[in-house]
Amino acid sequence: MKHHHHPATDPTAAEHYLPAMGRDWMLPLYDPFTRLIGARAAHRMLIEQAGLRSGQRILEIGIGTGNLLLMAKRRHPDVTATGLDPDPRALAWAGRKARRARVAVQFDRGFAADLPYPDGGFDRVFSAFMFHHLPAADRAAALREVRRVLAPGGSLHLVDFVPAAPSDGRFVRRAHRKVAAHGAIDDLPAQLRAAGFTDPAETGTNTTLMGRYATYQAAR
């Protein structure tokens, strides 16, 4: 089992991360922005495809303000939910929302490329519009870490921006270039296979005013 330093207390931990909205002062705009990109529908798709059952342990990496986890707990109150993010402001925001909703979620500070959890500790891992924020050099490590913390039979469920299609229209293509093209994911199944996942698959796509996104799943 791998030993981990918790980034919240480890002075050697990297402090480089991109806040949820790119700038700390923009965090209050996160929920309106996610509504604009259709994140609620994407969260619903991920939760449904995950096939959650009572007693399962779920983890979301890069929680934003906690919307996916809160939705999962409302729909499946008997799962054990944990959310990880490097940004203490986002964690505090999500914690307040969870308390208002009277939903029990554990929130931890940490980084996707060095998860502070034991091997096989989760049945499902979620990632929603976070993966493209990771530096390219960290993406392989993050996927290997996700696979490590998944129990046998566990799976990853991910949604993120992908390159716009020619059929998307000029406005969407232009918006996509501004919002997501710097990190749009176009080879995720190959990255998942390289990290040791089996049966990686794109499970759906959707086009919004802010660009095209796709949902994926892969088995441990």
Image (cartoon, rainbow, N blue to C red):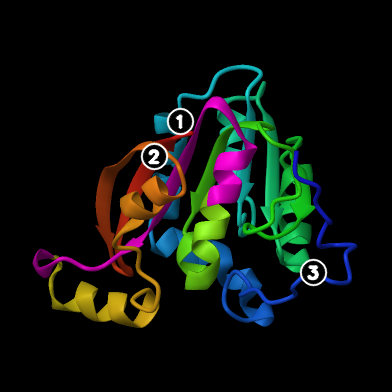
**Residue annotated with mark 3:** 13
Distance between the alpha carbons at the discs numbered 3 and 2? 30 Å
Q: Nearer the viewer, mark 1 or mark 3?
A: 3
Q: Amino acid at mark 1?
A: Ala
Left or right relative to 74: residue 166: left
Secondary structure beneath disc 1?
helix
Mark 2–mark 1 distance (CA, rounded to whole Å): 8 Å
Q: CA distance from mark 1 to mark 3?
A: 32 Å
- SS at mark 3 in the image: loop
Is 184 included in the stretch rendered in magenta? no
Q: Is residue 23 visible?
A: yes
Tell me where residue 102 sits by quadrant: top right
- Could you tell me which secondary element the residue under label 2 belongs to? strand
For disc 2, the marked residue is 217
Q: Which residues are magenta?
A: 144-167
Name above or below for residue 12 compared with residue 115.
below
Three-letter code for the amino acid on which mark 3 is drawn: Ala
Query: How many other residues sit within 10 Å of disc 2, few (<14), some (14-19) or many (≥20)?
Result: many
Quarter of the image where the N terminus is located: top right
Counting residues from the N terminus, which is met first, the one under dot 1 or under dot 3?
A: 3
**Residue 50 bears which disc, if any?**
1
Any part of residue 130 in sight: no
